[in-house]
Image (cartoon, coloured by chain):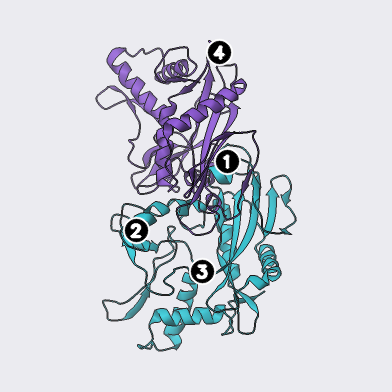
Chain colours: A purple, B cyan
C-alpha cells in the first residue's frame, strides 16, 4: 500500500510504499467522528500485450482534488499522486489479473486525522492507496439489475456534497439499499424533488436510451447540477456517443449498451489504442 | 477508554475499560470509506456535594440507538451501555473538574469496521467511549455569537440523515463554517428551502425569543421535521419553558437566556435536585 502523511506545519511528507497492514488511528480522529474523508475508485487492466493500463486516471485525480477542497482537506499535486499510484501498481503488477473479465481495483483514500474533537479543518491528514483484484461489480455480471424507487430517501441535495466522492454520501445510502433488497430489488433508483426527478442508481450514474417525442433515438443522463456524482464512465459514454452520432450510423442489431461496453472495455484492456489509456 | 466489539457471527463481546490509546484499523474499514459512523456528546458534572452527575443520559442512549439503526449499525441495550459509561466515569472520576465552569466531556462513538470495500451493512462494528475535560464551547463563553447565513449551503434535507448524529452531517458542514469565518462570523446559520427557513446554527439547535404579532412573548424553535438534530438541551429548554409559562410569571429584569442557563446548570451541577440528574 501507498501512504502519504500531511500536517499543517510540515506539509506533505515523503510517500511510502509498504506492506499492507492496519492503520494506527487516534480515537478522536476527525475521519471517524466527522467523516472528514473521501475516496476514489480506479482500475488497472492487463491487455493482450501483457501491459498494464489505467483508464483516464487524470480525471480521478481532478475529482479527488475537488472532493478534498470540499472536505477541507489539503490540496495536493495531481501529477505527483498519479505517479505514486503508477509506481504502486508497477510494484504490485502481478496482482493485475491475467484476464479480460477482471481487473485490479485501486482505492485512493484521504482522511482528516486531526486527533481532537473540535469540528474544524484538520491540521493532520493521511492519504493512502490500497489495491484488490476484482471481477464484475454485480454477481449477475453485465445483465440488467432491478431497481427500487421511493421518494422517501434522498441521496443528495443542492448545497450538499453529492457531487463529491465523500464518505458521508455512502453511509447515508445503505438504509435505503436494504429496503430495496427487502422489496426484491438489487439497487435504489434515487429520486429528487417534488416531481421525483431521476438522479442516480445505487452508487452509479444512470443513462436512459429512448425514442423521444420527435421520434428520434436519444441517450439521456441527468445533468451535473450539483447533486450528481461526475462519473468518469458517465463522461466517457457521453464523449463516445457524441462522436458516434457524428461519424457512425447507429446499428439496430447491436444494443447501444453492448456497443458502449465493448468500446470502453476495448480501450480499458488495450485492444483499441486510445489516448484514454495510461500505461503503467 | 471503554471499547466494545460486535460481529454478525458473535454479537456483542465483553465490554472493556482500558488505558487510552490508538485504535488498530483495517485500511478498508467502512467507517473510513463510507462514513458508517456516529457519535454522541454528553457531560459529567461535579456538584458542590462532590458527587458526579450526568444530565439526562437516557436521552443520549435513545438518540444513539436511533442513529445506529439509520446507519445500519447493530442495535444495543441502552441501559447496559449507560451502565458501562457510568462505570467508565467512575473509574476516571478524578478527571471531572472541581469547578462549576467546566465538566468532563463524554464521547460515545460507534463505527462500522467491516474490513472490505463493498457498500453494505457492516458485519463488524466497534463502539468506544473517550473522555476529556472541557470548558466553554466558545472562547467567548456564554456571550452572543455572530452568525453568517447563506442559502448556498444546506446542512441537511428531508429524506437524509440530519436528524441523526452521524459523522457525514458534520464533515459536509466545515466548508461553510470557514466561509462564515472569512466573513468575520463565528458560526453558520443554516437555511433550508426556497423560503430560507431557519433550521440550526453551526452544530447546535436554535431558539428565537420574540414578541409575536399578538403582542405575546414567545419562545420558538424549528420543529423536529427530519432535518433538525433532536438536541437534549433543546428538549430540556422546551420542557422548562413550558413549565414556567404555567407556573412562574416572566420577570422582565432577567433575560430568558440567562434564566434558562441558570436553571440548566443548577440541575447539571446538582445545585437543584432533579430527576434529570443521573448520579455516577
Residue ID at (38%, 88%) = B251
- For mark 3, what is the residue? B232
- Badge number at residue A50: 4
Q: Distance of mark 3 from mark 4, alpha carbons? A: 61 Å
User: Tag 3, which secondary structure?
Assistant: helix
Residue extending farthest to the top is A49
- Which residue is nearer to you in this view: A80 or A150? A80
Residue at mark 2 shares a chain with residue at mark 3: yes
* In contact (CB < 8 Å): disc 2 and disc 3: no
Q: Nearer the viewer, mark 3 or mark 4?
A: 4
Q: Quadrant of the N terminus of chain B?
A: bottom right
Q: Nearer the viewer, mark 4 or mark 1?
A: 4
* In contact (CB < 8 Å): disc 3 and disc 4: no
Q: Which of marks 3 and 2 precedes in the sequence?
A: 2
Q: Distance of mark 2 from mark 3, alpha carbons? A: 26 Å
Q: Quadrant of residue B106?
A: bottom right
Q: Nearer the viewer, mark 2 or mark 1?
A: 2
Does residue B94 show up?
yes
* In contact (CB < 8 Å): disc 1 and disc 3: no
Q: Distance of mark 1 from mark 3, alpha carbons? A: 31 Å
Q: Distance of mark 4 from mark 2, alpha carbons? A: 53 Å
Residue extending farthest to the left is A214
Residue extending farthest to the front is A10
Q: Is residue A248 above or below residue B225?
A: above
The chain identifier of the residue carrying mark 2 reads B
- For mark 2, what is the residue? B180
Residue at mark 1 shares a chain with residue at mark 3: yes
Residue at mark 4 shares a chain with residue at mark 1: no
Residue ID at (68%, 56%) = B3
- Which residue is nearer to you in this view: B241 or A266? A266
Amino acid at each position: 500500500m501507498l501512504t502519504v502523511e500531511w500536517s499543517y506545519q510540515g506539509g506533505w511528507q515523503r510517500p511510502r510504499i509498504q506492506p499492507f497492514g492496519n492503520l494506527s488511528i487516534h480515537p478522536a480522529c476527525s475521519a471517524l467522528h466527522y467523516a472528514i474523508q473521501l475516496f476514489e475508485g480506479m482500475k488497472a487492466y492487463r491487455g493482450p500485450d501483457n501491459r498494464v493500463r489505467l483508464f483516464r486516471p487524470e480525471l480521478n485525480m481532478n475529482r479527488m482534488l475537488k472532493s478534498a477542497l470540499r472536505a477541507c482537506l489539503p490540496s495536493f499535486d495531481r501529477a505527483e499522486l498519479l505517479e505514486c499510484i503508477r509506481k504502486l501498481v508497477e510494484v504490485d503488477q502481478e496482482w493485475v489479473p491475467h484476464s479480460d473479465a477482471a481487473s485490479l481495483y485501486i482505492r485512493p483514500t484521504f482522511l482528516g486525522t486531526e486527533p481532537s474533537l473540535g469540528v474544524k479543518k484538520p491540521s493532520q491528514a493521511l492519504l493512502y492507496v490500497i489495491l484488490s483484484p476484482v471481477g464484475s461489480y454485480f454477481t449477475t455480471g453485465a445483465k440488467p439489475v432491478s431497481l427500487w424507487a421511493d421518494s422517501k430517501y434522498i441521496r443528495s441535495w443542492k448545497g450538499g456534497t453529492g457531487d463529491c466522492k465523500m464518505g458521508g454520501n455512502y453511509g447515508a445510502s445503505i438504509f435505503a439499499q436494504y429496503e430495496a433488497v427487502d422489496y426484491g430489488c438489487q439497487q435504489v433508483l434515487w429520486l429528487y424533488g417534488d416531481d421525483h426527478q431521476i438522479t442516480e442508481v445505487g452508487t452509479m450514474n444512470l443513462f436512459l436510451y429512448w425514442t423521444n417525442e420527435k421520434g428520434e433515438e436519444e441517450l439521456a443522463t441527468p445533468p451535473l447540477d450539483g447533486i450528481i456524482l461526475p462519473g468518469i464512465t458517465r463522461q466517457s459514454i457521453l464523449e463516445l456517443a457524441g462522436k458516434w452520432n457524428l461519424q457512425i450510423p447507429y446499428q439496430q442489431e447491436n444494443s447501444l449498451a453492448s456497443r458502449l461496453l465493448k468500446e470502453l472495455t476495448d480501450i480499458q484492456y488495450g485492444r483499441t489504442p486510445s489516448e484514454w489509456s495510461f500505461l503503467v
